[in-house]
Amino acid sequence: MTNKLGGSLKKIGVLTSGGDSPGMNAAIRAVVRTGLYHGLEVFGIMRGYQGMYEDDIFSMDSRSVANIIQRGGTILKTARCKEFFEPEGRKRAFENLKKRGIEGLVIIGGDGSFRGAQKFSNEYDIPCIGVPGTIDRDMAGTEVTIGFDTAVNTAVQAIDKIRDTMDAHDRVFIVEVMGRDAGYIALHSGIATGAENILIPETKTDIEAIIHGLTEKEKRQKLVNLIVVAEGEEFGGADEVAKVVRQRLPKADVRVTVLGHIQRGGSPTCEDRLVASHMGYYAVESLLLGRKNVMVGVINNKIHYTPLDKAVKEKHKIGQEWMKIVKILAS
Amino acid sequence: MTNKLGGSLKKIGVLTSGGDSPGMNAAIRAVVRTGLYHGLEVFGIMRGYQGMYEDDIFSMDSRSVANIIQRGGTILKTARCKEFFEPEGRKRAFENLKKRGIEGLVIIGGDGSFRGAQKFSNEYDIPCIGVPGTIDRDMAGTEVTIGFDTAVNTAVQAIDKIRDTMDAHDRVFIVEVMGRDAGYIALHSGIATGAENILIPETKTDIEAIIHGLTEKEKRQKLVNLIVVAEGEEFGGADEVAKVVRQRLPKADVRVTVLGHIQRGGSPTCEDRLVASHMGYYAVESLLLGRKNVMVGVINNKIHYTPLDKAVKEKHKIGQEWMKIVKILAS
Amino acid sequence: MTNKLGGSLKKIGVLTSGGDSPGMNAAIRAVVRTGLYHGLEVFGIMRGYQGMYEDDIFSMDSRSVANIIQRGGTILKTARCKEFFEPEGRKRAFENLKKRGIEGLVIIGGDGSFRGAQKFSNEYDIPCIGVPGTIDRDMAGTEVTIGFDTAVNTAVQAIDKIRDTMDAHDRVFIVEVMGRDAGYIALHSGIATGAENILIPETKTDIEAIIHGLTEKEKRQKLVNLIVVAEGEEFGGADEVAKVVRQRLPKADVRVTVLGHIQRGGSPTCEDRLVASHMGYYAVESLLLGRKNVMVGVINNKIHYTPLDKAVKEKHKIGQEWMKIVKILAS
Amino acid sequence: MTNKLGGSLKKIGVLTSGGDSPGMNAAIRAVVRTGLYHGLEVFGIMRGYQGMYEDDIFSMDSRSVANIIQRGGTILKTARCKEFFEPEGRKRAFENLKKRGIEGLVIIGGDGSFRGAQKFSNEYDIPCIGVPGTIDRDMAGTEVTIGFDTAVNTAVQAIDKIRDTMDAHDRVFIVEVMGRDAGYIALHSGIATGAENILIPETKTDIEAIIHGLTEKEKRQKLVNLIVVAEGEEFGGADEVAKVVRQRLPKADVRVTVLGHIQRGGSPTCEDRLVASHMGYYAVESLLLGRKNVMVGVINNKIHYTPLDKAVKEKHKIGQEWMKIVKILAS
């Protein structure tokens, strides 16, 4: 028997891997239901490659993904699997797939997960389709990643609250958001909350300009100022920036908040649910059409496929226009 | 004295017009601060063309837009102005601008507001730049409008709550969202909440297919079903659809919720704040660069200018791919 | 073997019945885990008395209530069961309990559910403990009910959004909240959103005073006004009130929003989760201590037991002080 | 002319002092409007005692408190004023009141602010009424304080998000919430999020029991565990607790999040808006009735007055019942 699209693929597996991001459940749901619609059997693999290695794999039906589209986290859980880095580990993982007849995989995760998939596929000739699930949005081959929109809105809502108390006290607040290599969350949430300064890994920080601005405000007795900082900016995060500020403006009332893991959880936004649904859908279609080892991305609102080994973390250039707008709008 | 960009423009006005949408305040803020940055004097005009007609106009400084980026509604208020439809009314409005030396306008609103601006500009040669503020997103010349992302997330969060009680009772819920001419809010919020059926103005509703689906579920004693309806769909909204469903399935427990005006308010999402900030910024740049009577839009993530008289409501085609995904994912 | 508290009770059942309310899942969780802690076997009964009648009953362990404390709705679902009104139906229901050895019941629901429990207990001598789960808060024997705090906050957040657009347009908004017999949701949400008028079942509506107030505002060209209406107020809800207002002030821009079922769903507030956890805990303790046919309530922050047949809907008096505060604070 | 209640008081001042809390704006609004209703002139004093000392005082009308009931922070701002600790400072502050004829004060703040008020009143015989605005809820003379309910719900929503990612990864999370002297926020938010362990200043922490529990879970390969910690617990906060856990369970994946200042801001909950509205109302009534130097509190849902010098921070006893419930429900 062939599936609806005419291919011979009959069984596929789906897993989430690496850091979790809101919307992963919506992607799982889309993979499962699109697979079932096309007559496939779909297996859930628990805790990423770990479950593949440990044979923690189960058959999913439509109900197993009911009522999860709105939930943060991932029902398949995620982990980093040391064993999968070793040939032995991948061999065992493959055997667990083989004994069930699983002939294709959808991997929801980040670039590290895709590298693993590429290697695995090279060795065992099993087609792998990547779906970019990461809050950082710094992937080549796609302009959107599952979880970014939710993470950035979580950050915005948190910073809005901080602004209430900042304004009540006339304080300097330094808020650290996620982004070890990429400043998107900082940039977007900073502009959206009217931050006076935004420090990101992509650009050199002109600390003297910042200190100068703060000093001017202090002279005018009106030192209220919001600085949004990506964890990967050059000083090393909010605490380090605060040290500098406190040293240079010893009388300033400087407070630090590190938003941390709240940015990874929560019910996904509409956008993230849609993106995840689309990507999950096209991931299964890709397998059925015989695509191999590509990541499903979106560029200019259109589905775009990138070879998995090109779907790496990419430090996009942040246009100078952006930084100029930050400066003008916060002034 | 010339302004920073080298032109001779010295004074501009900004107004919000038509139905309000979340993010309008962020756009006002961007217009005011970008104007001030370039050495312009910026006037706020209250209640759209009404304030222009009634001379309710005031000079704005940076502080007058402090702490508004996160607020729903519009600090300039909005209204529909009958007098502005008449030549007499526009004459009086122009005189109110002239006596202050206002030589350019930024109009934040929808297609009706832009038509008024075009007419006004034709008569009095005052450059007008449109910024699309409407939750419906159905404008030619732009893929995004200020307020859509917030409205659709508000709808999603409301429908998530309804799903809780729907699932607890095994009921049929018909939820009406805004969209008199466009089904975007219904389509996006429906997919994002896993709606079984989505009824929109852009496509013909196959009511028999819906009834058939419900009847099948009723036979299996499992009649829980979410139908999301745009107010402008062919039956005339949720109450009308409910009549049909109740008639055909008299034993079903059918409930209706009309989300209504909650979709217009609320703190804007990150996306709407960013879009509004960008568009407001480019609206002022446009005036300074001598552009006339265009709307600032975004297509493929790039700023795009459309003549105001082309920036009309446009019924986009909803791809069949979308409706297929709805069907597959909700099954 | 006896359980930890020394009694001979070994198996209990838990069900949710009547209209659902946010926090019911937290109560189920508390009942199950408290029961397990005391060495009991705890059975979940699906869809209230319907599942008892149809023998849809299953044994629950600690994991079956994991990760539900934050969820709206009820994992046990709820329904109204006609058969349970008949002696035959109750007989069958009892037999389903008996064959499993279930000797005590926790009923999470409203006064109708408690009357059913009382009758059942009278006939079959099975102790029933009631836990008040209703968003309306109008029960004798308790000052708090599970779901009220969430419902009222949902209403407040929705009305906040409506206020944004109301203020932008200078409109009269009439917002209907739930409360067929009780005005608590209207009263609390109305005060909290600064409503000018609040119409509730407990007090006579002075419509002439309202019309007078609106007329005065209209004269001053400043007719923006929020009226919050309980569905059970004397005119019959928001649409009926709107008819009167439109008739008397034909030029006013009057809009109606009926919040509807969004008030029943959503993640419960901290308060509702706590109240549910406490009540569920004390419900099981009560069974173990040999209490019979009482509702667990809270009065003056202390647990309070009321015989089930006294735990009826009660129209509390709303102090005149309250209505005076509404008037003063909205002026 | 006498005011409506018949006294001779004509002018009062209102200020917010100490740490800000959500709902302070609702209290200011209630004070202003209740004062105006009774024919008083009401002055806003900026930045607490600082504005009193620096003569930053302005007359307020009804519109100056329009549309603030839903906002976090305080429009009157807050600060700590060194000068007010000195007799000279208080003298100057008094003169600023005297020259305007201000004869009564409403102080919205915490115990430190009340001590200042008491001293000031002793010296200058100006009646002061305290309104408890603090998220910590640890005041003698009242069971509720403005801001607690909002802070605890903010904490709950943040921890819910953290739980998503905790569950996805099977991690140990240690979340620090506010509460230097009091564990209410930790206790309530911990129970509401199903925390396995809650560490608060009021009780001795049995760290060995916690380590034992974690070790047991680790043995079962299922080490997912949420620990909620008040900043003032005996180990010194989340980072310190994490050190101990990491030392004792070196293989565990332990993460720390310090929620920080997000707990101080945000739109107040319905409860906090109501409490603030009531307390503000009764504060003005108290002044009119000739009460002096009391704090308006609520005990058993009734207004309760406590002399300002008795309205101190109070470490309430946390019943053993509570800690037992934590243990049972999280198991």
Image (tube, coloured by chain):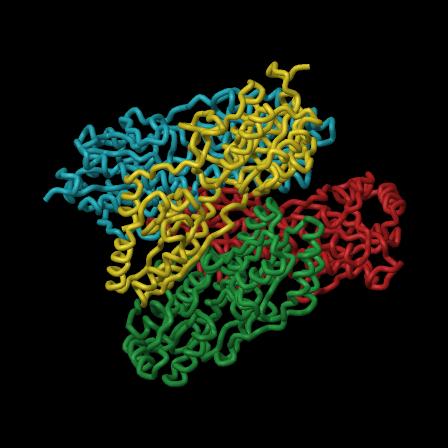
Chain colours: A green, B red, C cyan, D yellow
* Rendered residue at 57%/70% (across/down): A234
Outermost residue toward the left in this view:
C1
Outermost residue toward the front in this view:
D87
Placement of the C terminus of chain C among the 4 image quadrants: top right
Along the horizontal axis of the image, is C326 left or right of C270?
right
Outermost residue toward the bottom in this view:
A123
The image shows residue C63 at horizontal and vertical percentages of 28, 54
Image position of C285 with respect to C138: above or below: below
Along the horizontal axis of the image, is C30 left or right of A143?
left
Q: Quadrant of residue D244?
A: bottom left
* Rendered residue at 54%/45% (across/down): D266
* Rendered residue at 61%/69% (across/down): A300
Placement of the N terminus of chain C among the 4 image quadrants: top left
Q: How many marks?
A: 0
Towards the viewer: B56 or B50 = B56
Q: Quadrant of residue C301?
A: top left
Asked whether residue C237 appears in the rendered view, the answer is no
Asked whether residue A107 appears in the rendered view, the answer is yes
The image shows residue C132 at horizontal and vertical percentages of 34, 34
The image shows residue D260 at horizontal and vertical percentages of 49, 51
Along the horizontal axis of the image, is D114 left or right of A98?
right
Towards the viewer: D294 or B155 = D294
The image shows residue B123 at horizontal and vertical percentages of 88, 51
Towards the viewer: B38 or B295 = B38
